[in-house]
Amino acid sequence: MGHEIDRGQEIRTVLSGLGVGGLTAFEYDLRGPLAGVPDISQRIDSPSEALALSRSGLDEGTRGLLRRWGEGRSQGKGPLAEIPSLWLEFDLRARRHPRPLACLRLPPSVGDLATIARDAFGPGSCSRSQAKCLERCRENLPRGARPLYIFDLGARSVGLLRLELFGIPFDGVKAYLQKIGAPVPATLDEVSSCLSTGERPHLSFDLAPGGEILHRIGFETSFQKLPRSEPRWSEMLSRLATLGLCDQQNVDFLLAWGGQKKIVIRPREAGESGALKGHGVRVLSHIKASFRGQERVETKGYLFFHFLRFGEN
């Protein structure tokens, strides 16, 4: 496959103790060699898993989030009862074993975003100014678009939130950013033209405690079909390579990532009787362009790994 995912101590430390049933994502910068440790995210789907992790060695803030979500979800009470899942993201490239970022997957008929953020991330996690900005972003959404994720980026910068939106057409992104008072990257049109053939568009941006939308704008896309049956994956990556935003070796690696294999997983402290047998499923998830300032552009590829026990669909 050209490159191998680093399975060093950093990855093992992060994943040890996390559930093997969740979806795991590897995040790589596409502009250079896919070497070293990637950033890693894992999805938490079940309240029981969240409550177990709330008693783990994670930091106090993350444990509190897991406990609040697990209790709200299992009891069917409060703003978090309808939140179907959450993600924990470990920025391993920046530092070793950091406090994870937290991300909530929002339901289609989500309630007040500020209330959800405060209930999940803590009372001081969404300022009045941020609440007003969230409402403005929501009021100006075009038909068919909706909030998809809300992030607590406090591990990177105190009080920082991120909102991710689903369904804004590629040709409507600039107009929407202008409506909500967000900065429009100078290279938006050039880069987004490479991604415009994609499906399921996502737009994200960061909200400072004062309510202003910062210069980091994220734009991502994917296709419903896998690369082996969808030639537009290859075409899109090749266009990014032409712009110097994706190394050609990375194009080959991403397109070859998909597949599955029978594997055995032995959770920490489990003996032979605790071995779990199933399929390790690999999927190319999506491609993301992040605009930081007016000129700088970062491109990332997201690779999913999912362990499915025998008998699961």
Image (tube, helix red, strand yellow):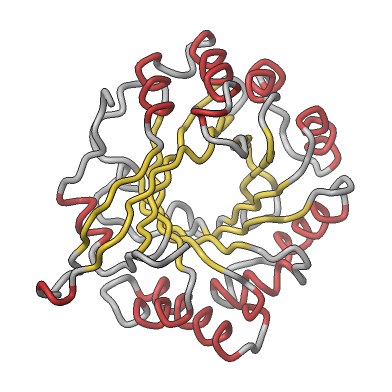
From the top left corner, tell me how far across and down residue 4 is, in percent: 24, 33
Left or right side of 49 for 288: right
Residue drawn at x 70%, y 60% is 130
Residue found 79% across the figure and 30% down from its top: 174
The answer to whether residue 274 is above or below residue 157 is below
Q: Position of residue 231 (x, y in %)?
A: 57, 21
Closer to the camera in the image, 143 or 306 = 306
Q: Quadrant of the N terminus?
A: top left
Which residue appears farthest toward the front when viewing the image? 311
Q: How many marks?
A: 0
Q: Give above or below for 129 relative to 200.
A: below
**Quadrant position of residue 125:** bottom right
Q: Quick one: which residue is furthest to the top in this view?
A: 242
**Could you tell me which residue is drawn at 49 percent across and 13 percent down?**
241
Q: Nearer the viewer, residue 207 or 62?
A: 62
Q: Is residue 35 left or right of residue 164?
A: left
Residue at 40% across / 14% down in the picture? 248
Q: Nearer the viewer, residue 104 or 76?
A: 76
Residue 16, placed above or below residue 244: below
Q: Nearer the viewer, residue 298 or 234?
A: 234
Where residue 115 appears, as percent x and y from the top left, is 70, 74
Residue 141 position, x and y percent, is 84, 48
